[in-house]
Amino acid sequence: MILLGATTERPAAIWEGRTSKMPKVTFIKDGKATTVEFEKGKLPYEHHGLPESFLDVAMNFNIPLEHACGGSCACTTCHLYIREGEQNLSEPEDKELDRLDTAWDLRTNSRLGCQAVINGDVVVEFPMYTRNYVQEGGAIQLGKSDSRDEEKKTAEAQP
């Protein structure tokens, strides 16, 4: 984006911490990237986690992101890894950090999709493992997403 009267050279000190009016969010699941863009303050809010969180954005753009607790920070099914743009997210609060302590394969770049509010361009990856206490009684879900399981079941069902 080039602003009228601005140069294409953008010193980091000027742009660092500035929020984008049209953040781009890239969701990576099973190696496949899906990028969406939304206008800050214009996204319809349907109480999917915090407004303009990863969960809220994903639900608005029909990107499946598990959220067994409804986005109330009571589970870790919306656990994501931040690949790029961590500086463009809200700071994690204590309740998110406490809940993340129970996530499978916790990393330094882990965030809960229902709590991390997006302020600029970000790239996130879905982990291969999640704990869904509501649907699985605390069991661990292993492997790839359901889309691959469905393909396998369909292939096995054919004569």
Image (cartoon, helix red, strand yellow):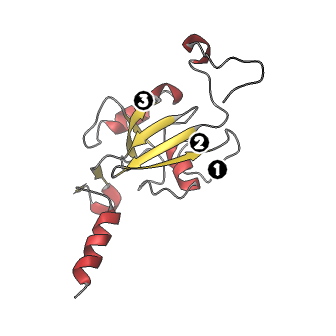
Residue at the disc numbered 2: 52
Q: Mark 3 points at which residue?
A: 94
Residue 107, label in figure = none
Contact check, label 3 and label 2, Cβ < 8 Å: no
- Is tag 2's residue or tag 1's residue first in the polypeptide sequence? 1
Sooner in the amino-acid sequence: mark 3 or mark 2: 2
Q: Is mark 1 on a helix, strand or loop?
A: loop
Q: Where is residue 68 in the image (x, y as percent from the top left)?
A: 41, 56
Between the residue at mark 3 and the residue at mark 1, the CA separation in whole angstroms equals 24 Å
Q: In which quarter of the image is residue 38?
A: top right
Q: Residue at point 45% right, 28% down? A: 86
User: For mark 1, what is the residue?
Assistant: 45
**Which sits in the foreground, 30 or 99?**
30
Please determine whether, in this image, residue 36 is positioned above or below residue 152: above
Q: Image check: 74 left or right of 89?
A: left
Q: What residue type is labelled 3?
A: Asp
